Amino acid sequence: MWSNVLYIDLDTGEHTIRDRADLFDKYLGGTGVATQLLLEECPVGVDPLSPQAPIIISIGPLTALLPCASKAVSMFKSPLTNELGESHVGGRLAMAMRFAGYDSIVIKGRSDKPSYLSIHDEEVKVKDAASIWDVSSIEVTGQILRNVEPGKGRRSIMRIGEGGVNQVRYANVNVDTYRHFGRLGLGAVFGSKNLKAMVISGTEEIEIPDMSAFKKMYNKLYNSVVDTDVMDKYHDLGTAANINVLNQLKGLPTKNLKQSHFENAESLSGEYFADNLLFRKIACSNCPIGCIHIATLKTQFHKGHEFEFRHISYDYELIYALGTNLGITLAEDVLRLIDRCERYSLDVLSVGGVLAWATEAYERDLINPSDTLGIALRWGDTDKYLKALDQIVKMPNKFYQALAKGTAVAAAEYGGEDYAINLAGVEIAGYHTGPASIIGQIVGVRHSHLDNGGYSIDQKASSQQLTEEKMVDKIIYEDYWRMVNNSLVCCLFARGVYSEQIMIDSLASVGIIKTRDELEALGKEIFLAKYQFKKQEGFDLSRIKVPSRFYETVSQLGKVTPETIDNMLTLYREKTGV
Ligand code: SF4
């Protein structure tokens, strides 16, 4: 039904459009189709920053149709981990791709000069980006593109800042100002291709096979989002509500996971942000939830000069990474750090992990002022962290070059691997809830807490006495079913709405008939295809080392032991075959 793939070659500036019904009929869209395209297009063992490495972006069969089916999936080879890279984004991108008539976009090659992609319906152009290549701020780049590109109100604008241009391995891609392809370094891949930005819009109409069945489904979903309390948390305080909750449960990573609670958590809580800094809430296109919380930060241009008001999005993960994990005590300081990461287009979770490791390494004299270029890193010292961030992006010496490659690489070069808080090479999300969270991030295809929600399985285990095997079974169930969800592509925040039956009914409402067994088998097949890619790029679950800090700091479920992790990993490998 919807199966157009736009192939763009940056070497030549040429493009082709191919109908890939063979992929979309079988894998639905989103992550299912993108995985197959990655396997087709990415040469085994390729350097992720070479012209041959592809960027793939896909949407799903419900995109721009049903509520919360608002996301697009990108797949690439990650320059941070050298294996599977996958990241999801909201904003307007998915909707713009649907109306432009492209269900997937494959970008290969390297432009011989700074460029950006301009895609408006069937008009696809590689344009000169010389004037914006050195613009360090994603905000200003966005303003310039808004002035020169058509599609106002319908377009989506993706762009990178200086972090992406300089190929920091965890640079992200900013999408429509407040959303990101956040994790695993897609921004560096953009930079390696001399690709500064992509603007896309479209005016196509969408044909629905049975409008009355579709409207019924739409209303049912809309009402379940708006008229029940199932999504209230996301709209009200947003995910920032988790700060106080996880702090009380001793699950909130603090000061490089030396602690799992923070004495100053209240001043960084969702309640504090809402009462003192919240400016407005906004939503991705076609989503009635509106979970994106925007704060206002008043800053001074320079001593003695006027003030400006900056609008900065915040959520739980960002407050953990640049707040509790760095010992920051003022919410305004967390916003200053988020704002600097935004300007450079850097993944906040990785930045927080890297700076936390560097602070502890400095504290232990593993690194010294000659490494940091005189910046005395100290818990809670925002000004020092801002200066260090500037150096990470500019990479003036060996130390900052190592930091720009992530915590695992920096610790391999300088030591301190026991407290280099990463799992499988990826800086962790803000949960130290127990063994399921640790295992979930190790085995997850993109090493994200959202691959299988291990943290939430820990929380269930605290009240239901789950055995290690039961926890592993739940992780596997989520690993498979979230592949289905991510092929549709629905926002994972709305997974309480998109139950198995609702996914089946939603597909039927747009003319795609699938049974529960077929979807479950498809989820497993997509999961295994991703592991095929991971293994061919060298990922090996049997070689994963967990830094000892994970075992030393008490979690929500008490101290986790290496024996528990070994046992659960063995069970997981036996049951999935990976
Ligand atoms: S719940 Fe939030 S992140 Fe998800 S689609 Fe809606 S606004 Fe976007």
Image (spheres, helix red, strand yellow):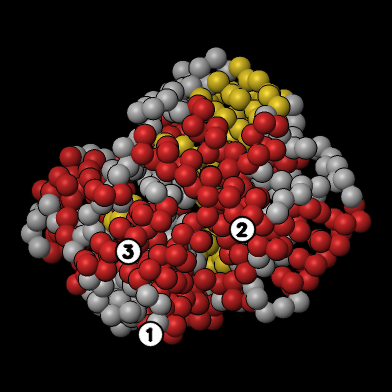
Q: Which mark is residue 248?
A: 1
Q: Amino acid at mark 1?
A: Gln
User: Which residue does the numbered mark 2 point to in the structure image?
Assistant: 491
In terms of image quadrants, where is residue 537?
top left
| Residue at (18% x, 64% y) in the render | 548
Q: Is tag 3's residue or tag 1's residue first in the polypeptide sequence?
A: 1
| Residue at (14% x, 56% y) in the render | 416
> Relative to residue 526, is residue 555 drawn left or right?
left
Query: Dot 2, how many residues are within 10 Å of its Cα: few (below 14), some (14-19), or many (20+)?
Result: many
Do the numbered discs 3 and 1 sit on residues whose CB atoms are within 8 Å?
no
Query: Dot 1, how many residues are within 10 Å of its Cα: few (below 14), some (14-19), or many (20+)?
Result: some
Q: Secondary structure at mark 1?
A: helix
User: Which residue does the numbered mark 3 point to in the structure image?
Assistant: 568
Q: In this view of the protein, can residue 268 be seen by the observer?
A: no
Q: Which mark is residue 330?
A: none
* Marks 1/2: CA–CA distance: 28 Å
Q: Is residue 257 above or below residue 143?
A: below
Q: Amino acid at mark 2?
A: Cys
Q: Secondary structure at mark 3?
A: helix
Q: Amino acid at mark 3?
A: Met
Do the numbered discs 2 and 3 sit on residues whose CB atoms are within 8 Å?
no
Does the beta carbon of the residue at mark 2 sit less than 8 Å from ligand 1? Answer: yes
| Residue at (61% x, 58% y) in the render | 491
Percent position of residue 169, x then y: 35, 41
Q: Residue furthest right?
A: 212
Q: Is tag 2's residue or tag 3's residue first in the polypeptide sequence?
A: 2
| Residue at (37% x, 58% y) in the render | 572
Percent position of residue 395, x then y: 26, 40
Q: Is residue 25 above or below residue 47?
A: below
